């Protein structure tokens, strides 16, 4: 049974009293659910997960593969060919040993194979995403069977009693049972940036808007302050977040550039084929004065139609994209849809988050400023080892007790835990607080020991609006002795004796400083002067300009525990302790990746919620921006009209203090300027921007399921360098697709012209049967084309601007190349065909008169081998290239040549394909004419080099 079986009140939980909601879900606020009830509800409602919508059925996905216009034409050709074979069978005109319907069967087999390939790849992409979603399973604290336990979020069921506290992501929709000073940020659902004060006691009208439902909480939102007990009412796809996921999945994406180009190519080829067929049929009818040779005309037309359509192209493209996908996965980029592989190659702008993508998301304290001294802190990661240095010299903590005082504040005004896991130090909690714990540990201050001496009795939690956090502790005599014995600042030791309670405060340096009236001077306190304030603010700016995230610390003795919501009055008259500057260091590989972007004509853009000075420092260090470049803040962006933003968007590479909803406006402004945009994101609010972007890139580690659903690509390592690697791969894939399109269609045009020329020069008959053409298009074209699909990148692939995603598939000379090479193919083959016809019809010739057709067939096939070798590079001569840099091309040429010769010299294959035995002279002539194709292409490269031109 699905979650739709919830009580009818499920849509209006906010209109119910707490007791009524508990009754409806048969739950108890104090004891929670029993194990038996949990199992029953898990079976009834399923897991608390965002499910992928049913979407298209298996049959719909399969049938969609056969909507390609080229495949539809092949189906028509197969049916007509079958009809002609049926007529010959009934009239007894089949040749001895001829197998009827073999052309029809072969063509339909190719059509079905292409359909299955497309179906398998599309299904795999969705399965890969489903597997990725299982990688994350947040932990939730609940009351079950009277005990508090931690469970995976997906195990939540309606009726569970969930416990919330500051910093938690809410894992399901629920009705508040009780709350204490609870504030929740719901911008992911409502777009409202301000946190909402929640109240469990309210009973609201049923028609209350989502943003005004103050007695319920929603999945995907964040607790920024306080605590609460919540009755889980909706899970999975019945939550408000699930509804957003459903809507996002219902949005149809625009065709990718590759899909548009392939549609254009199919239309051109099919239209051209139908026009040629009409010309041949009408011309033949006029020439013969009637329809007496209509069957022969239809056979010529069918051969031409089969020759025009590159039957192997869809399969080669699918395999090429699949290979590109596999290479990207090895580089930690999961492609959700195959065409997105090529689309990446068209990106002109990459908009990236900072934290975790450009940086390591691992904060490390670099600098401490206290008592008018700046100390440098050494050490890496969360390991509690390192030194404190003053003016480049290591100092002892006994000589600088002010560091110990500040370190006590860092350790106690903190909700995280520093622990050692499998031999490595790690943080359970916020990375910023982890860096503070590591700093304290380096100063010999261990949080666990101090928590036992100074028990926490109250707090004013951190919120984005308050930008500070305060924690109140009860002072005990033993703490004083312990502190003094460990060399803690005497000022702190005496403070512990003076009042029964002590409050430590941390947060925005400007705000903490504004609330401070005294300053800690090591062994004493003194009034805080204006000169000292200015010096502290200057040091704060100096740290921020180096890319450091800076926090200010203070303390205050208290005579009693302050009441709830008294933070505005209680957090006044503080004693200033100092500044702590920490760095989320850039990933070492990102700087090179940014330079690679610059060289490739791609503009990287940083979008972050951090301070503009920090953002500027990191962006400048990485090369994303230059000194003095403008930083656009969220407040400035909010005041801009869409037109003003569009006018500035090409001039700004750093966006600071922005919220996720601003991303959508940035993407739209860039797209209106004609940019092809890749956008990163991880939150629910990022989903619209990811959907809007030409390439939406979700974070695999920190990203939500909704952001992954809205994306085209998922970064498994959340690393900017991976985006650049994927972009390079996209360019390589597109270059190789163009390369084998040139290769395949050039020969197809030559085949068509050869077939059409045979009756025009009076040779009579069709030189190539549909089955032979299929062999060429699938084997002698297909195998080398697949080998060309893994051709290594040209040396300058990331040294040029991206090609326009709106360019035609025939752009930059590809169309003229195909026509030119097709004509050369035809001239060479027609010359061979004329010689072979005269040779086999000479009076002294002892062989089969139709042997000339096999010579044409063989020449076309072997000529393609030379073409494959020469086309590996547009500009470099074959002799200048390493023949083993793509061993697959050499292997494909050798294997295909052997297979072609087997069709001529192995009797069963010769009978099936309708070929004839060639003597050594005839084979040598075929090879000689075939070699002219290779010579011509190499000569073109030399000519272009002499003329100073470069083929693209």
Image (cartoon, rainbow, N blue to C red):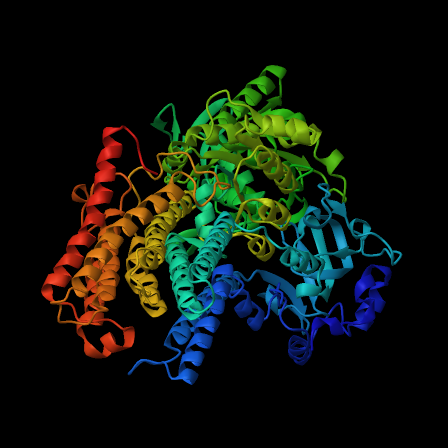
In the displayed structure image, the side of residue 96 where residue 127 appears, left or right: right
The percent position of residue 841, horizontal first and vertical second, equals: 19, 65
The percent position of residue 412, horizontal first and vertical second, equals: 56, 44
In the displayed structure image, the side of residue 738 where residue 610 appears, left or right: right
Foreground residue, 646 or 458? Answer: 646
Eyeballing the image, is 117 above or below 369?
Answer: below
Eyeballing the image, is 140 above or below 25?
Answer: above
Whether residue 508 is visible = yes
In the picture, residue 462 is in which quadrant?
top right
| Quadrant in which the C terminus appears | top left
Identify the residue at the far top of this view: 531
Q: Residue at x 37, y 58 (%)?
A: 323
In the picture, residue 9 is in which quadrant?
bottom right
Foreground residue, 143 or 926? Answer: 926
Q: Residue at x 64, y 73 (%)?
A: 46
The percent position of residue 199, horizontal first and vertical second, equals: 81, 52
Identify the residue at the far front of this view: 289
Whether residue 574 is visible = no
| Quadrant in which the N terminus appears | bottom right
Eyeballing the image, is 515 above or below 189?
Answer: above
Q: Residue at x 37, y 40 (%)?
A: 589
Q: Residue at x 50, y 23 (%)?
A: 542
The percent position of residue 100, horizontal first and vertical second, equals: 37, 80
């Amino acid at each position: 049974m699905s979650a739709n079986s919830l009580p009818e009140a499920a849509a209006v939980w906010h209109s119910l009293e707490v007791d009524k909601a508990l009754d409806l879900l048969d739950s108890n606020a104090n004891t929670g659910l029993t194990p038996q009830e949990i199992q029953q509800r898990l079976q009834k409602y399923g897991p608390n997960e965002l499910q992928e919508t049913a979407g298209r059925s298996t049959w719909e996905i399969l049938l969609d593969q056969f909507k390609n216009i080229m495949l539809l034409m092949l189906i028509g050709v197969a049916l007509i060919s079958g009809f002609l074979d049926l007529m010959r069978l009934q009239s007894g005109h089949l040749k001895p040993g001829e197998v009827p319907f073999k052309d029809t069967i072969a063509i339909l087999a190719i059509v079905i194979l292409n359909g299955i390939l497309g179906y398998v790849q599309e299904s795999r992409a969705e399965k890969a995403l489903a597997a990725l979603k299982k990688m994350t399973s947040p932990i939730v604290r609940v009351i079950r069977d009277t005990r508090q336990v931690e469970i995976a979020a997906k195990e939540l069921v309606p009726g569970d009693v969930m416990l919330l506290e500051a910093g938690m992501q809410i894992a399901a929709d629920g009705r508040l049972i009780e709350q204490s000073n609870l504030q929740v940020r719901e911008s992911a659902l409502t777009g409202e940036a301000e946190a909402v004060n929640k109240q469990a006691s309210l009973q609201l009208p049923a028609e209350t808007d989502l943003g005004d439902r103050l007695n319920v909480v929603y999945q995907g939102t964040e607790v920024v302050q306080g605590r609460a007990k919540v009755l889980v009412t909706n899970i999975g796809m019945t939550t408000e977040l699930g509804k957003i996921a459903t809507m996002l999945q219902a949005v149809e994406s625009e065709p990718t550039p590759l899909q548009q180009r392939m549609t254009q190519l199919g239309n051109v080829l099919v239209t051209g084929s139908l026009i040629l067929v009409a010309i041949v049929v009408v011309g033949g009818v006029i020439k013969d004065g009637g329809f007496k040779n209509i069957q022969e005309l239809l056979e010529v037309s069918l051969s031409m139609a089969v020759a025009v359509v590159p039957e192997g192209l869809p399969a080669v493209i699918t395999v090429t994209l699949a290979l590109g996908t596999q290479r990207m996965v090895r580089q930690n980029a999961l492609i959700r849809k195959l065409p997105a592989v090529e689309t990446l190659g068209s990106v002109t702008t990459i908009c990236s988050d900072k934290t975790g993508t450009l940086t390591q998301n691992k904060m490390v304290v670099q600098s401490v400023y206290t008592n008018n001294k700046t100390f440098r802190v050494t050490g890496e990661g969360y390991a509690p080892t390192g030194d404190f240095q003053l003016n480049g010299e290591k100092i002892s903590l006994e000589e600088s007790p002010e560091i110990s005082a500040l370190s006590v504040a860092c350790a106690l005004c903190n909700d995280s835990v520093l622990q050692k896991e499998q031999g490595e130090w790690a943080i359970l909690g916020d990375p910023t607080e982890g860096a503070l714990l590591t700093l304290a540990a380096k100063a010999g201050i261990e949080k666990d020991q101090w928590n036992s001496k100074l028990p926490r009795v109250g707090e004013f939690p951190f919120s984005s609006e308050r930008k500070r956090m305060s924690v109140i502790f009860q002072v005990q005599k033993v703490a004083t002795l312990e502190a003094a014995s460990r060399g803690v600042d005497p000022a702190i030791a005496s403070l512990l004796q003076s009042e029964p309670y002590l409050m430590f405060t941390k947060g925005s340096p400007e705000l903490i400083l504004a609330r401070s009236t005294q300053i800690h001077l090591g062994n004493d306190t003194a009034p805080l002067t204006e000169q000292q304030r200015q010096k502290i603010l200057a040091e704060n700016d100096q740290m921020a300009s180096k890319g450091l995230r800076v926090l200010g610390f203070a303390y205050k003795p208290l005579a009693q525990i302050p009441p709830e919501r008294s933070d505005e009055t209680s957090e006044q008259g503080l004693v200033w302790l100092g500044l702590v500057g920490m760095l989320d260091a850039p990933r070492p590989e990102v700087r090179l990746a940014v330079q690679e972007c610059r060289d490739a004509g791609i503009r990287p853009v940083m979008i972050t919620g951090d301070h503009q000075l920090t953002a500027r420092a990191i962006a400048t260090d990485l090369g994303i921006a230059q000194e003095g470049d403008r930083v656009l803040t969220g407040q400035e962006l909010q005041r801009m009209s869409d037109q003003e933003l569009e006018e500035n968007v090409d001039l700004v590479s750093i966006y600071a203090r922005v919220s996720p909803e601003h991303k959508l406006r940035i993407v739209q402004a860039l797209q209106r300027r004609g940019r092809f945009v890749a956008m990163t994101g991880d939150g629910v609010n990022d989903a619209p921007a990811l959907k809007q972007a030409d390439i939406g890139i979700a974070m695999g580690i920190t990203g939500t399921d909704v952001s992954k659903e809205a994306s085209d690509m998922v970064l498994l390592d959340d690393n900017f360098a991976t985006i650049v690697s994927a972009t390079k791969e996209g360019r390589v894939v597109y270059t190789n697709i163009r390369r084998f399109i040139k290769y395949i269609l050039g020969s197809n045009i030559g085949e068509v012209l050869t077939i059409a020329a045979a009756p025009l020069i009076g040779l009579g008959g069709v030189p190539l049967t549909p089955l032979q053409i299929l062999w060429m298009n699938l084997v002698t074209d297909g195998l080398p084309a697949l080998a060309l699909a893994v051709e290594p990148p040209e040396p300058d692939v990331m040294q040029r601007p991206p090609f326009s995603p709106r360019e035609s598939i025939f752009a930059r000379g590809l169309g003229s190349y195909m026509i030119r090479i097709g004509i050369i193919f035809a001239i060479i083959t027609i010359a061979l065909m004329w010689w072979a016809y005269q040779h086999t019809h000479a009076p002294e010739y002892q062989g089969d008169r139709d042997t000339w057709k096999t010579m044409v067939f063989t020449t076309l096939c072997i000529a393609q081998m030379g073409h494959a070798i020469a086309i590996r590079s547009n500009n470099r001569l074959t002799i200048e290239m390493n023949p083993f840099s793509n061993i697959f091309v050499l292997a494909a040429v050798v294997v295909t040549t052997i297979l072609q010769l087997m069709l001529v010299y192995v009797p069963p294959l010769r009978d099936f394909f309708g070929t004839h035995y060639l003597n050594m002279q005839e084979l040598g002539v075929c090879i000689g004419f075939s070699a002219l194709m290779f010579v011509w292409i190499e000569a073109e490269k030399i000519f272009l080099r002499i003329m100073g031109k470069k083929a693209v």
